């Protein structure tokens, strides 16, 4: 039986340049879908999967992230005084316990693999999850929970996988599949951002991983890969002939909130899920589409 996965690393040290100028002062992970920052969706998903320790790899200018996880005694007192119990409940539901969250600085943005490596001393000989908060996944059963359940059967290393159209494959790490078992595939190769027309499959890796601590040894010896960065994909690929690598086809809708188009789509989709917003938003969308059509 595999060891339990109780720690998750959240690499949030990237510069978020696609959202400039906003990300000049607002960390991308604090930007909100409706009324919750991206990072809150990631925390909720991790908690549902049984994660107890939350390790953030941050960088300069991410202070707002640490503030977000702090308690807010003044705000709480004010809401209590005004009898705003519902808001108080929402606020308190985001509180983290003392010692549950750890922060590690990535001093130089050398890539996702390097960001994960920065957290190596907080993980011992145990499997751990990696969650990229810009990948937001709407799912009946949270994506990481689906993966943890599958991982209990397989062990090894597991990456979340999603079918993408061939022309989009070069934006992702892509799996070379050894055996397709339906929701799970075993992997015989991984290519980070393959050149157009060379992707070994249409199964792309997205921002959820369950990894063994061997990955840190592999990262120790890695040189810069695609894009001059230390690639997590390369470190995982080294385990193909070691502890094994599996792709997991999760059930759910993934939004790439690291891109403007994905962020806008997620905003609309999550807005439509909220009962108190649905009618207004739906009416507005119909109206704006009709008036654009009429103007054509
Ligand atoms: P991205 O490729 O989305 O880069 O990183 P980015 O800097 O966040 O955004 P853009 O492309 O400039 O707009 C994917 C994930 O890896 C983390 C990011 O924070 C994000 O969660 N990352 C990336 C690091 O933590 N450190 C790095 O050196 C690079």
Image: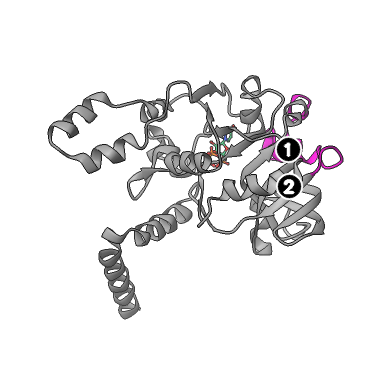
The residue located at (72%, 41%) in the rendering is 233
Please give left or right for residue 149 compared with residue 276 in the image.
Answer: right
Whether residue 73 is situated above or below residue 273 in the rendered picture: above
Name the quadrant where ligand 1 sits: top right
Whether residue 141 is situated above or below residue 20 in the rendered picture: below
Is residue 191 at all visible to an observer of this figure?
A: no
Bounds of the magenta segment: 218-244
Please give left or right for residue 154 compared with residue 204 in the image.
Answer: right
Residue 276 point in image, percent of width and height:
26, 59
Whether residue 121 is situated above or below residue 51 in the rendered picture: above
Whether residue 230 appears in magenta in the rendering, the answer is yes
The residue located at (46%, 42%) in the rendering is 44
Q: Earlier in the sequence, mark 2 or mark 1?
A: 1
Question: Mark 2 CB in 8 Å range of ligand 1?
Answer: no
The colour scheme is one colour
- Identify residue for label 2: 153
Secondary element at image label 2: helix
* Circle on res. 2: 1
| Picture mark count | 2
**Most foreground residue, 277 or 229:** 277
Q: Identify the image quadrant of residue 89.
A: top left
Tell me the crowding category of disc 1: few under 14, some 14 to 19, or many 20 or more residues within 10 angstroms, Cα based: few
Q: Identify the image quadrant of residue 92.
A: top left
Work out which residue is located at the far front of the displayed protein and give it.
1
Q: Quadrant of the N terminus?
A: top right
* Circle on res. 223: none
Tell me the crowding category of disc 2: few under 14, some 14 to 19, or many 20 or more residues within 10 angstroms, Cα based: few
């Amino acid at each position: 039986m595999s060891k339990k996965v109780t720690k998750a690393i959240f690499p949030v040290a990237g510069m978020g340049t696609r959202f400039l100028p906003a990300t000049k002062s607002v960390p991308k992970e604090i930007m909100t879908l409706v009324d919750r920052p991206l990072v809150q969706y990631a925390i909720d998903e991790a908690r549902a999967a049984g994660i107890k320790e939350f390790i953030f790899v941050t960088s300069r200018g991410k202070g707002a992230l640490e503030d977000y996880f702090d308690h807010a005694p003044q705000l709480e007192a004010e809401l209590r005084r005004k009898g705003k119990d519902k808001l108080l409940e929402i606020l308190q539901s985001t509180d983290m316990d003392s010692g549950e969250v750890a922060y590690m600085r990535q001093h130089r943005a050398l890539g996702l693999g390097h960001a994960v490596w920065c957290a190596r001393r907080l993980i011992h000989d145990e499997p751990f999850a990696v969650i990229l908060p810009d990948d937001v996944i709407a799912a009946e059963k949270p994506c990481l929970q689906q993966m943890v359940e599958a991982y209990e059967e397989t062990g090894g290393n597991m990456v979340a996988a999603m079918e993408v159209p061939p022309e989009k494959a070069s934006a992702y790490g892509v799996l070379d599949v050894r055996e397709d078992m339906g929701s799970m595939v075993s992997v015989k190769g991984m290519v980070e951002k393959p050149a157009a027309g060379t992707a070994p499959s249409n199964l792309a890796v997205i921002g959820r991983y369950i990894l063994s601590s061997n990955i840190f040894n592999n990262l120790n010896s890695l040189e810069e890969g695609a894009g001059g960065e230390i690639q997590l994909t390369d470190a995982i690929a080294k385990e193909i002939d070691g502890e094994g690598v599996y792709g997991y086809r999760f059930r759910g809708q993934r939004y790439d909130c690291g891109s403007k188009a994905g962020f806008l789509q997620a905003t609309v989709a999550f807005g439509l899920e909220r009962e108190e917003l649905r009618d207004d938003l739906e009416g507005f969308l119909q109206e704006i589409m009709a008036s654009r059509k009429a103007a054509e």
